Image (tube, rainbow, N blue to C red):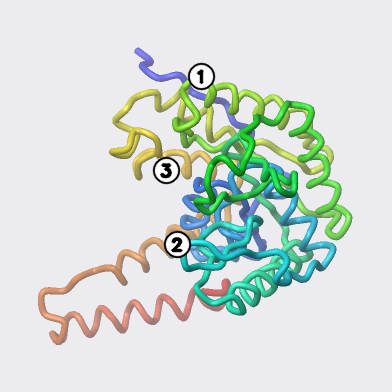
Amino acid sequence: MNLQTQISISKETINPISYPSKILLVGSCFSENMGHKLSYYKFQSSQNPFGILFHPKAIENLITNAINEKSYTEDDIFFLNERWHCFDAHSSLSSSNKNDLLSRLNTQLKTTQKQLLEANHIVITLGTSWVYRFIETDTIVANCHKVPQKKFLKEVLSIDEIVESLEAITVLVKSVNSKVSVLFTVSPVRHLKDGFTQNQLSKSHLITAIHQVVEPRNNTHYFPSYEIMMDELRDYRFYAEDMIHPNQTAINYIWEKFVNAWISEESKETMKEIETIQNGLNHRPFNPSSKEHQQFLQSLQAKIKALQKNILL
């Protein structure tokens, strides 16, 4: 008896992710989950240089500014609640010092440009179609930074608007890095503050738009994170206590699906070795000064050095 529907995911054979690959992850908080996994297994990955970005317009803005070598100035930031903020970035970059914020923004933008030029794979995770438009400038922001709600207009991006944004992202990236693989996915995190119906509307716009853009022959792909959560893991036991975010079991499950679809076979063997080392590093001995534990540490260091000959740890 089969008690679970299984989503069929094609295995990438043309340009799979391997240890020489450089990977950039951008987007919603689910990209952070996948980024942490890649980091744990010591892939050459980086994530969210401007912090978590929830919608496609924010990601498009970041990539556009990075490629065009924008330089942030005082005109691009504002002071509120004793901190300096930028509407283009997540609050994790905000600072109590104006110059510190500008330095962070410009440094991260240069870093993003370098990553776009060098990346073999770019993973873009879209969280929502809902956006906030700052009335004073008539621009869509990446983050409201607790600016009063009355200063914004809330609107949902149409499918055509999202398609236009995703196409712009792809064209921009390919203009500086023609061989890069772009992988889109939709975050399984539910944005219930928008409302249950509005969340479903939002996700459906994202999925429909992505499928109008994705074309494997052009090295643009789709990974069904959202569908795995909704169909294979359709149970509240796979959610965190807030009933909004996937819990660690769900994250691990989706990660395994990602590995099977996108990680090269030779890299899977290396991942097993790294997991053994990571478990060893996390081991808590009863007696740290014992001879047995010292021998264990020596053996662990020998394994690390052997592995460093093949990959950059």
C-alpha distance separating marks 1 and 2: 36 Å
**Earlier along the polypeptide chain: callout 1 or callout 2?**
2
Residue at image location 61% in from the left, 44% down from the top: 151
Q: Is residue 238 above or below residue 53?
A: above
User: Dot 1 corresponds to which residue?
Assistant: 197
Is 187 or 96 nearer to us in this picture?
Answer: 96
Residue kind at label 3, given as amino acid type: Ile
Q: Are the residues tagged 2 and 3 within 8 Å (C-beta)?
A: no
User: Dot 3 corresponds to which residue?
Assistant: 251
The image position of residue 125, as x and y in percent, is: 60, 43
Is 275 or 226 nearer to us in this picture?
Answer: 226
Residue kind at label 2, given as amino acid type: Tyr
Is 83 or 23 nearer to us in this picture?
Answer: 83
The image position of residue 206, as x and y in percent, is: 65, 30
Judged from the image, the secondary structure of the residue bearing numbered disc 2 is helix
Residue farthest to the left? 286
Residue at image location 40% in from the left, 27% down from the top: 233
Residue at image location 43% in from the left, 65% down from the top: 274
The image position of residue 238, as x and y in percent, is: 34, 33
User: Dot 2 corresponds to which residue?
Assistant: 40
Residue kind at label 1, given as amino acid type: Thr
Q: Is residue 183 visible?
A: no
